[in-house]
Image (cartoon, rainbow, N blue to C red):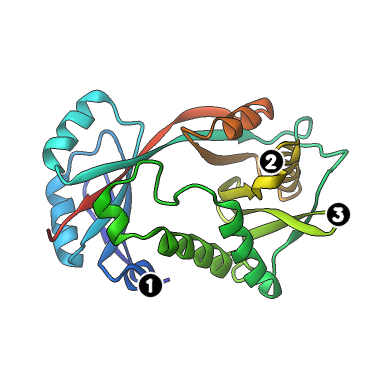
């Protein structure tokens, strides 16, 4: 993926990432950034947006408060809230990372599994990748077909044994691939999970809890002491399963799509 970076040299550093891959896919200038609610350097954001000539910025705001949101709406009137992600952390301990009675068989994805992983990602992702809340203009510029292609191709390209520490696993039940997850283990001692999903027809059992237990055991084997992940606010079954398996909510991420070049 082509990446360009803009860093604000100040007490707070924000990074806007220009995504050449997504810009080409959606046929517009597309960027991403994540900030905390104490961020106030909007002039620098405008400079970066102008430098990259962005049409859209997908912005994640970690734990925004009411004062921030009030000011943010004034500074970014063309921003659409697309979703809220509940953030979780898991403390990896020997006691809680055992997996004595696995249900599925997990295998690490390789280049030979790349197409299977992509198809499984698209098959398990039954929501809208860019967020729960949809708007006519967003739907026009970011069709669901392209959004699914975006997430499927990104994870299958980046996590099919292409770079050490970026790993995807496919779960098999009676020899059939029915689930997958992708995690980043490069930032030791903390692992982060980008995606986990199960085919819809297999969601009425304990497979998700089984996946969590496999993941915790995998972290233990790799010497990880903590893992972070997220669940969409509207996805209650995932939240219930994660909390039953020892995940602790530590905040929320509000996701916006900001329009430029009207």
Q: Which residue is mark 3?
A: 174
Q: Is residue 97 left or right of residue 40?
A: right
In the picture, the quarter occupied by the C terminus is: bottom left
Neighbours of disc 1 within 10 Å: few (<14), some (14-19), many (20+): few
> Mark 2 or 1, which is nearer the eye?
2
Evaluate if marks 3 and 2 touch, with contact meaning CB atoms under 8 Å apart.
Answer: no
Distance from Cα at disc 3 to Cα at disc 1: 39 Å
Residue for badge 2: 203
User: Does label 3 or label 2 sit earlier along the sequence?
Assistant: 3
In the rendered image of this protein, does residue 157 appear above or below residue 209? below
Numbered disc 3: secondary structure: loop
Q: Residue at x 58, y 66 (%)?
A: 156
Q: In the rendered image, which residue does mark 1 sit on?
A: 2
Q: Quadrant of the N terminus?
A: bottom left
Q: Nearer the viewer, mark 3 or mark 1?
A: 3
Nearer-the-camera pick, 237 or 12? 237
Q: Spatial distance from mark 3 to mark 2, Cα to Cα?
A: 16 Å
Q: Position of residue 32 (x, y in %)?
A: 32, 55
Reply above or below: 60 against 2: above
């Amino acid at each position: 993926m082509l990446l360009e970076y803009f860093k604000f040299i100040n007490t707070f550093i924000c990074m806007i990432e220009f995504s050449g891959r997504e810009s080409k896919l959606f046929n517009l200038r597309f960027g991403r950034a994540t900030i905390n609610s104490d961020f106030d350097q909007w002039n620098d954001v405008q400079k970066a947006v102008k430098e990259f000539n962005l049409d859209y910025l997908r912005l994640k705001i970690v734990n925004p408060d009411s004062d921030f949101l009030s000011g943010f709406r004034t500074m970014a009137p063309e921003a659409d809230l697309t979703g809220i992600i509940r953030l979780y952390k898991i403390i990896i301990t020997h006691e809680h990372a055992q997996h004595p009675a696995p249900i599925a068989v997990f295998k690490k994805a390789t280049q030979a599994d790349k197409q299977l992983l992509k198809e499984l990602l698209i098959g398990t992702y039954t929501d809208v990748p860019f967020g729960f809340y949809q708007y006519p203009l967003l739907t026009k510029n970011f069709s669901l077909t392209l959004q699914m292609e975006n997430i499927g191709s990104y994870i299958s390209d980046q996590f099919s044994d292409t770079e050490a520490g970026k790993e995807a696993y496919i779960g098999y039940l009676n020899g059939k691939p029915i689930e997958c997850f992708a995690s980043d283990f490069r930032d030791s001692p903390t692992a982060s999970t980008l995606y986990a999903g199960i085919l819809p027809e297999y969601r009425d059992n304990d497979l998700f809890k089984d996946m969590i237990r496999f993941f915790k055991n995998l972290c233990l084997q790799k010497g990880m002491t903590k893992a972070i992940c997220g669940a969409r606010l509207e996805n209650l079954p995932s939240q219930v399963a994660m909390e039953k398996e020892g995940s602790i909510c530590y905040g929320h991420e509000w996701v916006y799509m900001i329009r430029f070049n009207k």
